Amino acid sequence: MAMTMSQKILAAHAGRREVRPGELVMATLDLVLGNDITAPVAIGRFADFGNKRVFDRDKIALVPDHFTPNKDIKAATQCAVMRKFGIEQGITNLFEVGHDCGIEHALLPEKGLVTAGDLVIGADSHTCTYGALGAFSTGIGSTDMACGMATGKTWFRVPSAIKVCLSGVLRPHVSGKDVILHLIGLIGVDGARYESLEFAGPGVAALSMDDRFTIANMAIEAGAKNGIFPADAATLEYLSAHGAKKPRVFEADPDACYSRTVEIDLSSLESVVACPHLPSNVRKVSEMGDIAIDQVVIGSCTNGRLGDLRAAAATVKGRKVKNGVRGIVIPATQKIWLDADREGLLRIFVEAGFVVSAPTCGPCLGGHMGILAKGERCVATTNRNFVGRMGHVESEVYLASPAVAAASAVAGRIAGPDEL
């Protein structure tokens, strides 16, 4: 039977020659991930599986990133639970604030902990990020995380797939964030419900790895089980540069069956924003009109990488954040923070009027470091703009690329870099 990339990875990890959409399979895991919000719940259920030790201390990653640096006693307690468990179990990839840490979905690829062909689960919905590396990665609940830590296995319903065929090359100032927002706008927030979004076509080679991470990261916002890119030369170069283990490259069969095919000409795309209160409520920046804003956030697991910071810094260099606008920049990892500092990007941000934070998910989930008050508007490079996502239920979040977010900070309204 012909299979897609995702189906081949699941078959290999289930010890099967082939799998079919809709089948339930038990598969062996390469990595189990948890953070300071989800891991404590999983740790509380770990004993239910009758195991005193985790299945493999090298195949679990615990990353404090959501309410860190700890914003209150409850947050500190959550991290303490995770830290204690990690130390007791001798978990190799137990990370700590500072100490070369960061936001989980930027940190794990940076550390070479995921490679092409891997099967990864994480108790965080944006675990689908690692599909940029040619891995099958997906978010799960904390109980499934507990099972994964105890047994090294979990079950999957084999997904059908949507083929997203990319062609052309992105215009200047247009990025992976615009690609994924355009796609979600086309198919809706449930358009790929429990399906794989499988990216293909000549346009893939024109996308940077940062673009691919951003696109795979937001596959969940279309309801997808996972998003995945082919492991091409750029992928293999990235994996080698980051010390990942030997990749296992899977390719979709030429006659693989897809539920539908979506064609996107990258050269036709413009800068867009997702308006409140859904990632699918997408409009072109050029059509937004005069919408004043109160805050800009550049960062998150979606757009806190070095390429994102470069794009934003290039937009604000020599300019100032408009009076009355709060600008917040959050490099996704300690390494990205240092690299951005060496390149002079952080100085550009600070001189423009931004504040630069330590790595944290912070404002993305309404945790800290940028909460919105009633009636306030924010342009953010984050991944969700649901009601109350970043603070008060009567606040608004507009999702955008780093270049658009930076331009909006300068203009004091939603704007694209071409306007400056």
Image (cartoon, rainbow, N blue to C red):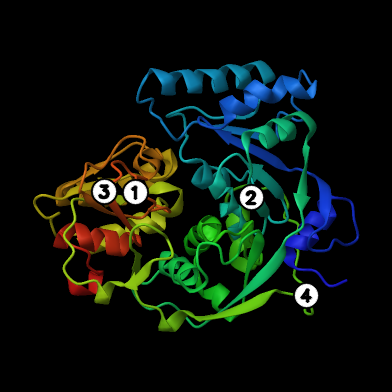
Outermost residue, left side: 323
Residue at the spot of label 4: 256
Q: Nearer the viewer, residue 216 or 110?
A: 216
Q: Nearer the viewer, residue 318 or 197?
A: 197
Residue at the spot of label 1: 340
Image depth: mark 3 or mark 4 in front: 3
First in sequence: mark 1 or mark 4? 4
Whole-percent x and y of residue 84? 58, 16
Position of residue 141 relative to residue 296, above or below, is: above
From the viewer's perspective, tell me whether residue 48 is left or right of residue 262: right
Whole-percent x and y of residue 33? 62, 38
First in sequence: mark 2 or mark 3? 2
Marks 3 and 4, how far apart at CA? 44 Å
Marks 2 and 3, how far apart at CA? 30 Å
The residue under label 3 is which amino acid type? Ser
First in sequence: mark 3 or mark 4? 4
Quarter where residue 333 is shown: top left
Whole-percent x and y of residue 327? 22, 48
- Circle 1 sits in a helix, a strand or a loop, which is it? helix
Image depth: mark 1 or mark 3 in front: 3
Q: Name which residue lies at 64% across and 50% down.
A: 138
Marks 1 and 2, how far apart at CA? 29 Å
Say whether marks 1 and 2 touch (CB < 8 Å). Answer: no
Can residue 249 be seen by looking at this rendering?
no
Say few, some or many: other residues with alpha carbon within 10 Å of mark 3 (under 14 / 14 to 19 / 20 or more): many
Say few, some or many: other residues with alpha carbon within 10 Å of mark 4 (under 14 / 14 to 19 / 20 or more): some
Q: Nearer the viewer, residue 330 or 310?
A: 330
Whole-percent x and y of residue 171? 38, 78
First in sequence: mark 1 or mark 3? 1
Residue at the spot of label 2: 138
Marks 1 and 4, how far apart at CA? 42 Å
